[in-house]
Image (spheres, grey):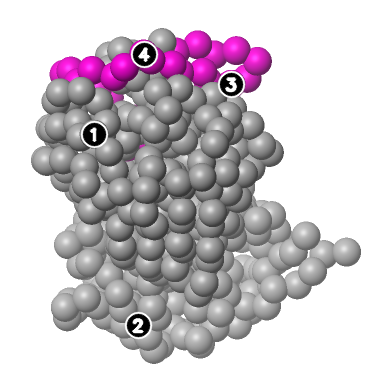
């Protein structure tokens, strides 16, 4: 086990390169197994634990996986199993994408129920609704989801709630279905678009990704392709918020500024200066910031995955701020950790009422989940004295080389083994 030891009080200056999007990569890698022939060469893959976990899972299913630098080559022609039942499957949420991918490839799939961060109830009912609408029979037994169909037939599917996972999963299954599938009330997140673009590069016929209506016309087969994953909007947003909190001037490279607009708008409202230049944004802050109100919403609204880092920034901003978490009901577990450092926060249901304080002080805290871990790192960077962040395996699931990237900007973070 390891922990991060952070000495706070340094401004951040310089440049940081953003890696490929975690939320896209963990869906694109399972999607590659639908290709019965050819190689999938996928670039801009982030070096994170969740990606390595998916790579091991699909290799265990019979795929040949070659990893080099930030690219992965997948040969799924030797895929020989529709049973995904390893420990890796059980510990990560995105393993449910294997259901849609295996269902498309074999017309059957058996996948153990997924895990992931404990941020609230995360049912897969909308996934099941979609699979059943396509003609599959779904049963849950002995902790596994078993899906089977003689054939998949395209149809109209209206999601009761906007769900990124269900949108992608049903889209995967529908790629080889007979006829046309129409997904209504679909999620519009950038990684939904990225998965659709990847599938189209393999020969799928998907239109409308990025809107709330996606049309998938089934094709006979998918084949290998070359593809590059989009930049990670959540990682970029995390560094933007850190720069605003610590003060200084940071240029964040390899981003799509359009994906960051909801974050940029809130930071500008707080008094941060933001400049866009092609595929980079520069954040300039004097730390004299005012509080704002934030409500998390599906894209293009403010991302729930950035809520926790944002809450740290609001803790040291002048005045009162409100955060309404409309996506996940248990995404405020980090608040108790922030209170250990002197934050003044009160929770009322899904709303955090934050009164800004002049300073935070170093303490021993833990990463309660992935994005909470990023929030605690930012808190440590602005706090007086030393902060120790425990349970950093959550952070390593989604942020590549986070201490190295921050240290290159002038932070002081050390990774230490815990005996």
Which residue occupies 53% across, 57% down?
A: 65
Q: CA distance from mark 2 to mark 1?
A: 48 Å
- Magenta residues, start to end: 138-166
Q: CA distance from mark 4 to mark 2?
A: 55 Å
Q: Is residue 185 visible?
A: no
**Up-down: is 400 above or below 302?**
below
Identify the image quadrant of residue 268: bottom left
In x, y percent, where is residue 416?
75, 72
Disc 3 target residue = 144
Q: Is residue 262 left or right of residue 394?
A: left
First along the sequence among labels 2 and 1 = 1
Q: CA distance from mark 4 to mark 3?
A: 20 Å
Q: CA distance from mark 3 to mark 1?
A: 28 Å
Disc 4 target residue = 150
Instruction: Depth check: give the residue in front, 339 or 141.
Output: 141
In x, y percent, where is residue 38?
36, 54
Disc 2 target residue = 250
Disc 1 target residue = 220
Q: Is residue 162 magenta?
A: yes
For mark 3, does the 10 Å Cα neighbourhood hold few (<14), some (14 to 19), or many (20 or more) residues? some
Number of the front mark, 4 or 3: 4
* Quadrant of the snapshot with the C terminus: bottom right
For mark 4, does the 10 Å Cα neighbourhood hold few (<14), some (14 to 19), or many (20 or more) residues? few
Q: Is residue 143 visible?
A: yes
Identify the image quadrant of residue 338: bottom right
Q: Is residue 49 left or right of residue 345?
A: right
**Up-down: is 102 above or below 199?**
above
In x, y percent, where is residue 77?
45, 46
Which residue occupies 68% across, 78% down?
A: 414
First along the sequence among labels 2 and 3 = 3
Is mark 4 in CB contact (under 8 Å) with mark 2? Answer: no
């Amino acid at each position: 086990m390891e922990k991060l030891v952070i000495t706070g009080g340094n401004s951040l200056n310089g440049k940081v390169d953003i890696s490929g999007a975690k939320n896209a990569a963990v869906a694109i890698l399972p999607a590659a197994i639908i290709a019965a022939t050819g190689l999938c060469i996928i670039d801009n893959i982030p070096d994170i634990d969740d990606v390595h976990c998916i790579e091991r899972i699909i290799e265990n299913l019979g795929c040949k996986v070659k990893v080099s630098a930030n690219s992965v080559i997948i040969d799924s022609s030797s895929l020989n199993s529709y049973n995904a039942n390893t420990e890796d499957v059980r510990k990560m949420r995105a393993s449910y994408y294997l259901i849609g991918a295996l269902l498309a490839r074999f017309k059957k799939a058996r996948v153990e129920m997924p895990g992931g961060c404990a941020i609230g109830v995360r049912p897969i009912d909308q996934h099941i609704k979609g699979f059943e609408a396509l003609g599959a029979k779904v049963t849950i037994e002995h902790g596994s989801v078993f899906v089977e169909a003689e054939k998949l037939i395209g149809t109209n599917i209206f999601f009761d709630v906007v769900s990124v996972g269900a949108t992608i999963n049903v889209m995967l299954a529908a790629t080889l279905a007979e006829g046309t599938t129409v997904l209504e009330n679909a999620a519009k997140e950038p990684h939904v678009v990225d998965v659709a673009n990847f599938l189209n590069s393999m020969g799928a016929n998907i239109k409308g990704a990025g809107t709330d209506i996606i049309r998938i016309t089934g094709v006979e087969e998918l084949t290998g392709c070359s593809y590059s994953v989009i930049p990670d909007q959540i990682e970029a947003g995390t560094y933007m918020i850190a720069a605003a909190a610590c003060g200084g001037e940071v240029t964040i490279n390899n981003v799509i500024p359009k994906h960051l607009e909801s974050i940029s708008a809130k930071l500008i409202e707080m008094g941060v200066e933001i400049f866009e230049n092609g595929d980079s944004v520069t954040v300039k802050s004097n730390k004299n910031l005012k509080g704002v109100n934030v409500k998390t919403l599906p894209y293009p609204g403010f991302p729930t995955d950035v809520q926790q880092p944002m809450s740290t920034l609001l803790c040291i901003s002048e005045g009162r701020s409100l955060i309404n978490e409309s996506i996940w009901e248990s995404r405020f577990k980090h608040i108790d950790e922030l209170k250990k450092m002197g934050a003044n926060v009160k929770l009322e249901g899904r709303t955090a009422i934050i009164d800004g304080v002049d300073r935070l002080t170093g303490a021993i805290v833990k990463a309660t989940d992935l994005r909470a871990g990023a929030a605690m790192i930012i808190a440590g960077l602005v706090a007086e004295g030393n902060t120790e962040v425990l349970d950093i395996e959550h952070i390593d699931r989604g942020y590549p080389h986070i201490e190295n990237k921050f240290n290159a900007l002038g932070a002081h973070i050390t990774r230490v083994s815990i005996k």
